[in-house]
Amino acid sequence: MADSIKAKVVEVGHNIAEAAKKAGHKMSEVAEKATHWVNEKAHAVGHRADEDAQKAKHAAQETSETATKE
């Protein structure tokens, strides 16, 4: 009887370990996807900031050219 209880406990222990392993892998996948999304958004924001800086520089140049012509 003790052997069958021990075997059942071992089996349950293995099942718990396997479930924890699967959950850990799933969490890792989700974290990787989130990291990828954040990197994409940061890259897009960087491009947007660069575009805005270029537009501001161009507008400043146009304003200074207009001011010197008058």
Image (cartoon, rainbow, N blue to C red):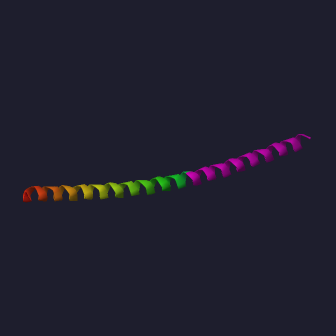
- Residue name at image x 67 percent, y 52 percent: 22
Image-quadrant location for residue 47: bottom left
Question: Residue sitting at 68 percent across and 47 percent down?
Answer: 20
- Horizontally, residue 3 falls left or right of residue 30, namely right
Q: What's the magenta region?
A: 1-30
In the picture, the quarter occupied by the N terminus is: top right
* Figure quadrant of the C terminus: bottom left
Direction top: furthest residue: 2
Residue 33, percent across and down?
54, 55
Q: Residue furthest right?
A: 1
Q: What is the residue that sits farthest to the front in this orientation?
A: 70
Position in image of residue 58 (x %, y %) = 21, 59
Task: Judge by depth and name the residue closer to the eye, 37 or 26.
Answer: 37
Q: Position of residue 7 (x, y in %)?
A: 84, 46
Query: Is 19 in the magenta?
Result: yes
| Residue toward you, 38 or 54 | 54
- Apparent side of residue 30 relative to residue 1 in the rendered image (left or right): left
Does 52 sit left or right of 37 as displayed? Answer: left
